[in-house]
Amino acid sequence: MNEKPDALPSSFRDPAGYVFRQENIYYRLITEAGKISYDGLMNSGLYATLTQKKILLPHTEMPASFQGPAGYKIIQPEQLPFITYHWEWPFALLQDAALLTLETAKLALDHGMVLKDATPYNIQWHNGDLAFIDTLSFEPYKEGQPWIAYRQFCESFLSPLLLMHYRKHSLHSLQLGWPDGIPLQITRSLLPWKSRFSVLTWMHIHLHSRYAAKPGGQKDKTAVVSLAKFRQLLSSLEMLIRSLKLEDEGTTWGDYYTEAATRNDYLDQKEKIIESWTRELTGINNAVDFGANNGSFSQPLAAKGIFTVAADGDPVAINKLYKKIRAGNLKNLLPLIVDFTNPSPAMGLGNEERASFLQRIGTNNLGLCLAFIHHLCIGKNIPFERVAALMALSCKQLIIEFVPKEDEKVQALLILKKDIYTDYTIDAFEAAFHPYFNIQEIKKIPGSARTLYLMIRK
Amino acid sequence: MIQDLIYIDPGSGSYLVQVIIGALLGVVMFFKNIKMYLLSFFKRSPKKQKDE
């Protein structure tokens, strides 16, 4: 009997298989119960089509001699650099993920298969694009069967997108409250009255929720939906989702760089210093840009081939960055809505089914923390020591900018606030980071009173 | 034999509503097609005039 490796804490629901990690590589076990699904995917030509279109994460089958848990087969999918959850996604990313799910469902029908799972957990970032990662989400289609994942799709994709579209706010954090989808009755009550005038919204949410509120009966069991109607259902969802948009209202920091750029050549100088430091740095793994805003400094890192997470709490700025990446086909850069002072928590069963943001980014990143420290320490009253300790948790190397109190941006933060920040000094800043990091380089940014530090964790 | 369906709760009412939506969509698509036809008719007519 083989030694039983650990199944991932998030991989326990599907009897058809589970994901496990062995010697730092992720594999998927397909059990005997998953044989029909897996063989259907492979033999129907669906796998070939989906991987050719770069929709499904490709995998290789491990030989029978492979030492792993017992089951029908073990496959090794292409490895993902990072796992992200939909409560961190900007509107346009969730919209693309919904469209990708529908396209997958359509292609499955073309091959006599059906997509049985329509959840954002199955979509991840792979090689600069979204990919469907769950190889076991398909099963043979039986003529007349309704779409088993219809409600799941409406609750987990359509509901948040419609709410954001109609309410004109990024309501991504609603998904933290309902990680498996916003219940239809709740979506219906939160949508404005006028949403009923969109015939597709009325059908998929308002009408749907009225039926979903009733207990299931014989009529559900005997419901027959023809293949043509099934396809029409998918097309109507696609049409509706394509028509949605989040209005780019004024953003907290959206105009920051337009304004900052006018300050001498501050941004250029800053970029030059960062470029020269990162060029000399060795052993860079992944990068995380804390307070990334429009991604001005994460983009050059990603362009060097470093997988970079651009994290910022401003959903509008992150949505804009995502759209820019899509348009420019910039790989290796993943923009996520993450507030550094309140990152995504660990969720789900035993608080370990979905790892927290800090757990997921790991401990060996190159961290960027640019023009951010004053927002944390003065804006949010976080002591330097706490920032240093948190940075040391996730960053092997750190490029951090100190913004002194006399800086106009700091003064702007202090207009209405009482200045209780007597210890906000460059000496106190260095002293706070000293226990965790060795300061390798210090450079004043020409044209400003700001200072850049390159630090290496002790 | 689709045993593994049991682990997902498709949600009561979501099957039945697909039958109703299926019927309604037929009507919606019928009118949408007429709309598209009319639009294409109007879009084509200026071209014809040009050709003439």
Image (cartoon, grey):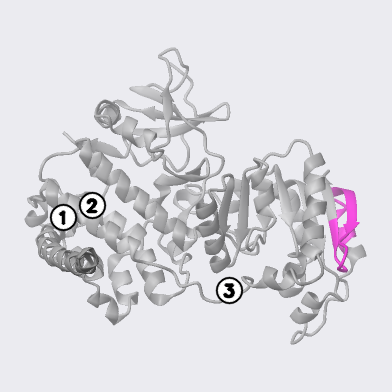
Q: Can residue A390 be seen in this snapshot?
A: no
Which residue occupies the foreground of this view, A388 or A366? A366
| In front: label 3 or label 2 | 3
Which residue occupies the foreground of this view, A18 or B30? B30
Which residue occupies the foreground of this view, A278 or A113? A278
Give the alpha-carbon distance from disc 3 to disc 1, as whole Å.
Answer: 42 Å
Write down the residue under mark 1.
Answer: B15
Residue B41 sits above or below residue A327 on the image? below
Determine which of the numbered discs, if any, sits on residue B10 in the image. Answer: 2
Q: Viewed as shown, does residue A353 lie left or right of A359?
A: left
Chain hosting mark 1: B
Q: Amino acid at mark 3?
A: Thr
As for residue A340 lying within the magenta part, the answer is no
Residue A84 sits above or below residue B32 on the image? above
Write down the residue under mark 3.
Answer: A251
Q: Earlier in the sequence, mark 1 or mark 2?
A: 2
Q: Amino acid at mark 1?
A: Tyr
The image shows residue A321 at horizontal and vertical percentages of 56, 59
Q: Can residue A291 be seen in this snapshot?
A: yes
Tell me which corner region of the image, top left, top right, bottom left or bottom right, holds residue A175: bottom left
Q: Secondary structure under badge 1? A: helix
The image shows residue A83 at horizontal and vertical percentages of 52, 45
Give the alpha-carbon distance from disc 1 to disc 2, as whole Å.
Answer: 8 Å
The image shows residue A38 at horizontal and vertical percentages of 30, 29
Binning the other alpha carbons within 10 Å of mark 2 as few (below 14), some (14 to 19) or many (20 upward) gives many
Residue drawn 21% across the image and 41% down it:
A109
What is the span of residues highlighted in magenta in the rendered image? A429-452
Q: Amino acid at mark 2?
A: Pro
